[in-house]
Image (cartoon, rainbow, N blue to C red):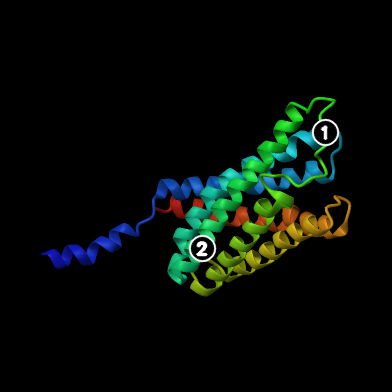
Amino acid sequence: MASQTTSTSPRTATIPSAAFERFAGLSGFITGLSSLLYAVFFLLVKGRPHDLLPPLFLALGSIFASALIVALYYRVREADPLFALWALLLGIVGFLGAAAHGVHDLATVLIPPAPNAPDLSTLPNQLDPRGFLAFGIPGISIFVFGWLIVRGGQLPRSLGYLGYVLGVLLVALFLGTLFVNDAHSLFILVPGGLASLLANPAWNLWLGATFWRRSATR
């Protein structure tokens, strides 16, 4: 009797939550849309919306991306549990750091520093220096998740290859901000534009649709 309980309990423990998968799907849609809006207002719009909305979308998208990546971890962890756990931890730390970065920038826009305050805009953000948490760490996490997708076969291999591309673009964007830190430099515009306009929305919307469909069939 005890042996039957032992053999069936792991199977029961691996049943995912349909409610959370539905929430992860919605989170993917919100994150993908936030990435697109971030790129539009950062690259194409000037004035106060350029200052106000990108950090808002960065914070919003990062918070919901943390839920999406938990569901992704649950789906691909059997491919390599320790690499999956490492990618999850990197992703959570990175997305929470990106959210803090966005809130910090939003706060400085809503309540500007005093006129006689020293200009610290050229110094690295102490919460997220040169986008290390917003771009570098999530890039590594997504690259590893892409590898797990390709290796495990739980999701389409093409989604894993997209994860490779997005991971490389995010790390390249971090390196551009680290060594160049000029918003008009091609070392920032090219990886940043490709990531925020194409790869990141595609990655998040694809994952969001996958989890939403899965939750609807259960």
- Reading the image, the residue beneath label 2 is 86
Query: At x 79% / y 41%, what residue is drawn?
Result: 41
Name the kind of residue labelled 1 in the image: Pro
Residue at the limit of the structure toward the left, as seen here:
1
Q: Residue 118 carries which label?
A: 1
User: Residue 216 at x, y = what percent?
Assistant: 45, 50
Q: As rendered, which of 84 and 116 lies closer to the eye?
A: 116
Q: Quadrant of residue 42?
A: top right
- Above or below 109: residue 146: below
Residue at the limit of the structure toward the right, as seen here:
184
- Above or below 198: residue 61: above
User: Around disc 1, counting alpha carbons within 10 Å, would you say few (fewer than 14), some (14 to 19), or many (20 or more)?
Assistant: few
As measured in the structure, the alpha-carbon distance from the residue carrying label 1 to the one carrying label 2 is 40 Å
Q: As rendered, which of 214 and 91 lies closer to the eye?
A: 91
Q: Is residue 29 visible to the viewer in this orientation of the structure?
A: no
Which of the image's four quarters has the N terminus?
bottom left
User: Would you say 182 lies left or right of 215 here?
Assistant: right
